[in-house]
Image (tube, rainbow, N blue to C red):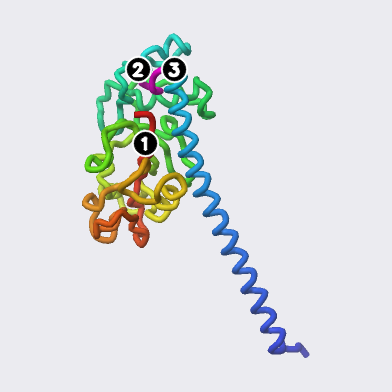
Amino acid sequence: MTRGFTLVELALILVIIALMIGAVLVGRDMVHWSTLRRAAGQLHEVTTAIGAFRLKYGGLPGDIAGAGTLWAGAVEGNGNGIIEGHLGCAPCDELEAYNAWHHLYLAGMVAKPFAAVSTDPPPDPDYSLEGALAGSFLNLVHDAPLTQLASTGHYLTLSMVAAPVTAPGFLGLIITNEPAGIPTGIYPEHARQIDAKLDDGQPLSGRIVSALPAMGSDELSCVELSGANAYNVLAEEWTCGLWSAVGQ
């Protein structure tokens, strides 16, 4: 005859199950925080690399006019101090934002072997640096993401878009024109955590900025609609992009 579990045994089983669930949740949180740390570290490393490139070669990657004399096969920039070219500018006469990655690779400042881009490319991960956050990309763009708060300059952008996208392209609520369920931005809470690690943790100030509340709507805004300088962390939508200022 099969013996049933005593109350003590059942209690012990429940404790073991609770401990196992807790361990799984703790492990998941550790992976999450580790990923966010890597994302912040990557953003910092690439921003630093761009600054180092400018100091060493006297120009910005992609824009530098003497690229062809420095490296065989490199596409020349026009040397006007602006990294030009972005998604939606087709036909693009300038592809410096794409070739910036090739120049950084040739200079030994990024590990991924980017190729030169001489014709207007389609959005493709091969023209962007894959981010530490799953599905994210880093891109260079010359833009003024928050014209009310920041001067026009160069920004390293973090989003789910595999091509340089200007602030008008992001529109703050950067999922607006995308098919349902397809992310193009990152969660406000993730944006806040990365911003806090590298800057002031606020979307409307500092070296790292994000979207204006006026650009979003209702609960989908990346930033608090009240006008407060705070991320709308309750929004569980892909509403945020991050712009990290690089060599201006």
Cα–Cα gap, marks 3 and 2:
13 Å
Near-viewer residue (14 or 39): 39
Assign a secondary structure to mark 1: strand
For the stretch drawn in magenta, the main secondary structure is: loop
Q: Which mark is residue 57?
A: 3
Q: Residues within 10 Å of mark 3 (few under 14, many from 20)?
A: some
The location of residue 106, given as percent across then percent down, is 50, 20
Q: Quadrant of residue 168?
A: top left
Q: Which mark is residue 245?
A: 1
Q: Which residue is mark 2?
A: 77
Near-viewer residue (13 or 47): 47
Of the two numbered discs 3 and 2 on the same chain, state the one appearing first in sequence.
Answer: 3
The location of residue 99, given as percent across then percent down, is 40, 23
Q: Which mark is residue 130?
A: none
Camera-side mark, 3 or 2: 3
Reply yes or no: does residue 35 show up in magenta. Answer: no
Q: Label 3 is placed on what type of residue?
A: Tyr
Q: Label 2 is placed on what type of residue?
A: Gly
Q: Which residues are magenta?
A: 57-63
Mark 3 and mark 1 residues within 8 Å of each other at the beta carbon: no
Which image quarter is the N terminus in? bottom right
